[in-house]
Amino acid sequence: MKITIIAKLLFLVGHVEAIAVIENVMEHVAHVLKKDPLEVREVNMAPPSVPRLRSAPLEKNVFADKILPLLKEKSSYKQRKQEIGAFNTTNKWKKRGISIIPVQYAMDYPPMMRYGVQVSIYKQDGTVAITHGGIEMGQGINTKIAQVAAYVLRIPLDKITFKASDSMIGANSMVTGGSFGTDLCAHGVKMACTALRDRIEAVRKILKEEEGSEPAWEEVVLKCHSQNVDLTQRY
């Protein structure tokens, strides 16, 4: 007997359909009232005091207060919308469009959501190796974590490398999903890199005083190793 298994994606059943329905309602209201759909969405954003169905209560709506106004400003939304309107008026068959659609995703961090991370700096060339309890599966977790590490340590991205996740460093790590893995692993790497940066700061200052200029990262790391400064940090 031959058994054929067909792989299918099953994720957030009903969410996409519900979002499509309510967004279509917003578009319809905007069309009838002859308003920008974004204006309709803005006035219907739930204030922080309104209970959320699947996430922790909000103290303030950072998106509505800061992110959305900045997004509209940086993207020249109003100007581009006017230009597109003028283009559509003069072109019968070819049309253009622009839209900003805010989406709320339930985010909360239960106590059991934890991931182990380890950051190691190698004395030979100052390379930084990172391993964590998350799983890279195309969502870009390693890219985001590399950016965090490079920012905290003040080094180029090409100095960052990753080692495969395993059950030694990532013992008891939770599943990677719902953006938990990316955010929490990035936080762990940030804390580990901050500890390393603070640890080697004294050596960097000494070298700077001796040489009269900012020492290279590789030089600082090598000096730290010669003085038995621990260049590995777990979190």
Image (cartoon, rainbow, N blue to C red):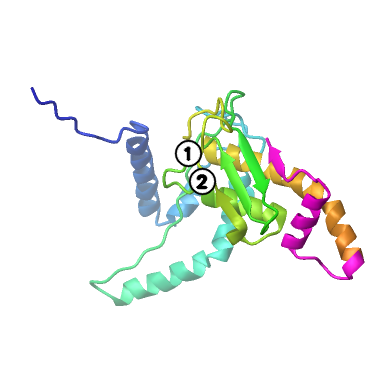
Residue 68 percent location from the top left of the image:
57, 53
Tell me where residue 34 sits by quadrant: bottom left
Q: Which residues are magenta?
A: 210-235
Which residue is disc 2 drawn over?
141
Amino acid type assigned to the residue bearing label 1 in the image: Ile
The N terminus lies in quadrant: top left
Query: According to the image, label 1 marks what residue?
Result: 135
Neighbour class for label 2 at 10 Å: few (<14), some, many (≥20)?
Answer: some
Q: Nearer the viewer, residue 112 or 166?
A: 166
Query: SS of the residue at dot 2?
Result: helix
Res 111 quadrant in image: top right
Q: Position of residue 41 (x, y in %)?
A: 47, 47
Residue 30 at x, y = what percent?
A: 40, 52
In the picture, measured across the screen, residue 26 lies left or right of residue 78, that is left
Q: Out of 159 and 123, give the one closest to the viewer.
A: 123
**In this image, 159 relative to 229: left or right?**
left
Circle 2: residue type: Ile
Query: Which percent across, then down, holds residue 192?
Result: 70, 42
Q: Is residue 214 above or below residue 68?
A: below
Question: From this viewpoint, which residue is outermost toward the bottom?
Answer: 90
Of the pair 47 and 103, the residue shown nearer to us = 103
Q: Work out whether residue 31 or residue 55 is closer to the camera in this orientation and state it.
A: 55
Badge nearest the viewer, 2 or 1: 1
Separation (CA) of disc 2 from disc 1: 8 Å
Q: Quadrant of the C terminus?
A: top right
Q: Secondary structure at mark 1?
A: loop
The answer to whether residue 188 is above or below residue 125 is: above
Q: Is 233 colored magenta in this rendering?
A: yes
Contact check, label 2 and label 1, Cβ < 8 Å = yes
Left or right position of 134 against 5:
right
